Amino acid sequence: MTNYEEAIDWIHSREKFKVKPGLKRMEWMMSRLDHPEEQLKAIHIAGTNGKGSTVSFLRNLLQTQGYQVGTFTSPYIVRFNERISINGHPIEDEELAVLVEELKPLSEELARTSLGEPTEFEVITAMAMMYFSRQKLDFVVFETGLGGRYDSTNIINPLLSIITNIGRDHINILGSTIGQIAEEKAGIIKRGKPVICGAKQPEALSVIRNQASVQQAELSILDQDFFVEHIESVASGERFVFHNKTYRSTEFVSRMKGRHQVENASLAIQVMEYLNSEGLDVDRSKYSSGLLKTSWPARFETVRLQPLTIIDGAHNEEGTVALVDTMKRHYKGKKVHLVYAALEDKPVEKMLLKLSEVVDQAYFTTFDFPRAVPAEVLVELSPISKQTAIEDYKEAVDAATKNLEKDGIVLITGSLYFISEIRKYFE
């Protein structure tokens, strides 16, 4: 019998960072497993940023209505099991081990075919499909891992699809223009299944519009078919109002800080509105409590009050712009010490240039990960005038803390994998 540790080791020993495009291996596994993916009422989410937060808003909105909701997300922040959750509760260790035991022989058999062995992400996706299909769930929300069109989650035929936004991330895999990246994300649009879209660039929208029309999929676009009015940033979060053609909300509060979170919330509300129009039992008066319950680890998250310490997984340019905007709205004029580590395939110079608008002093560091940039290299790329390189991230956090004035802020960001490490350290 496989135990949890062995199960996790086996999953991680799959071809981790090897991207093997195509859905053939997933299709092969699904047919051998008697098509668990066909038994799910799924909602599919792609986009550059905001997928995890949108999943969380949607899960809480559905759960507040009394529905049972499975979620498949990545990467994890605290523990691997988070990736496969029901009503926010990660899969149990034993259940995960049982799934691996079941999938292992299939994976070995697949490896002997011309298709080759499944990647780590394909294995996890298949496990999620198996697990969710065996539970009594009303909805399952799937987040893509990378792109959309060739993502292993794209074998589902969802009730509807969501595209949160389009930005330049993973350009070595998805393409270097906004249009090319939008094309990959728009690959999740299915025939006759509605799409709810938060993308703004004309270039992205024209690609998504085109794909929706080819697939005869009804398209709702933020700021065109549904709207969100950000009223103000307050200590408890963001105050806003949502409206579309048939509904105008009372004032909502999102505890997730940042103007961009209000847009993520609006995508989730628009999904509820669509389900409502399709006859799902939805009580709009419960939206407010669903939104208030929503949190998502490592998204402008406070991990310590003295001094105020915020972690944020802003791992690309768009995420960094949103982070800087949120800092300006909530903590204008405060002294900020940055602790930063990043991966080498990111536009680090542009991200640091943006951060320099709110940072007084930077402590560059690194962590144990295949593509982590050394601290000294970050110093060379940084435009921030007061900066220092400290290889050990725990020492970097200590230094940033020690040298801070009384009501200053320690801001820790750069890579989601780094933030995952940092979060464990604070726990």
Image (cartoon, rainbow, N blue to C red):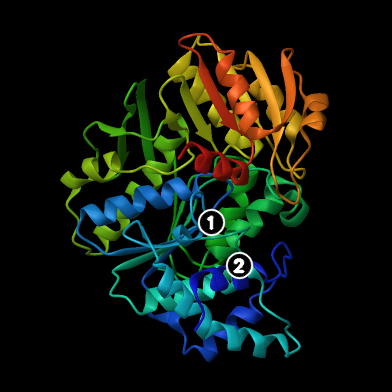
Residue at image coords 29%, 42%: 291
Residue 385 x, y percent position in the rendering:
74, 12
Mark 2 — residue? 121
Q: Residues within 10 Å of mark 2 (few under 14, many from 20)?
A: many
Can residue 37 be seen by looking at this rendering? Answer: no
Residue at image coords 59%, 18%: 337
**Depth order, front residue of 377/138:** 377
Sequence order check, earlier mark of 1 and 2: 1
- Eyeballing the image, is 92 above or below 231? below
Which quadrant of the structure image shows residue 263? top left
Position of 25 with respect to 50 (left or right) is right
Secondary structure at badge 2 equals: helix
Residue 415 x, y percent position in the rendering:
63, 41
Identify which amino acid the numbered label 2 is placed on.
Phe
Residue at image coords 63%, 84%: 107
Residue 308 x, y percent position in the rendering:
45, 21
**Depth order, front residue of 239/36:** 36
Residue 25 x, y percent position in the rendering:
64, 81
> In the picture, which quadrant includes the C terminus?
top left
Which disc number belongs to residue 168? none
Secondary structure at badge 1 equals: loop
Decide: marks 1, 2 in contact (CB < 8 A)? yes
Position of 379 with respect to 28 (left or right) is right
Which disc number belongs to residue 74? 1
**Depth order, front residue of 338/165:** 338
